[in-house]
Image (spheres, grey):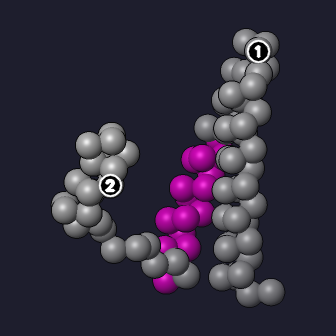
Amino acid sequence: MNEKDMMNDYLSMINASLTTYANVISQTDNPQLRQTLQQMRNQDEARQYTVYNAAKQRGYYKPAAPAQPNEIQQVRSELSGQ
């Protein structure tokens, strides 16, 4: 397995874990457990951003082009029900 594949696999795993954290945190009633899970999520988010930047610098990942102002406004209107 080459470096690009390893980085992409790792990013996929972290992204899946972040989704799981969001689901678990939203259903956790115990304040101490909730805080611990939030700290773990924050650490994974920082790790994900570090690996993402490394992949982007190596040319393994090319972000989507920025949205145009009219596209942003259209989505904003649709989501706000206007």
- Element at label 2: helix
Q: Quadrant of the N terminus?
A: bottom right
Residue nearer the viewer, 75 or 69: 75
Q: In the image, what residue occupies the spot 33% across and 50% down?
A: 78
3 relative position to 33: left or right: left
Q: Is residue 50 magenta?
A: yes
Q: Is residue 54 visible?
A: yes
Q: In the image, what residue occupies the spot 32% across and 54% down?
A: 75
Report the magenta residues as a range. Answer: 43-59
Q: Main secondary structure of the magenta part?
A: helix
Q: In the image, what residue occupies the spot 68% across and 47% down?
A: 18
Residue nearer the viewer, 77 or 55: 77
Above or below — where is 1 with respect to 63? below
Q: Residue 75: which disc?
A: 2
Label 1 Cα neighbours within 10 Å, binned few <14 / some 14-19 / many ≥20: few
Give the amino acid type for the residue marked by disc 2 in the picture.
Val
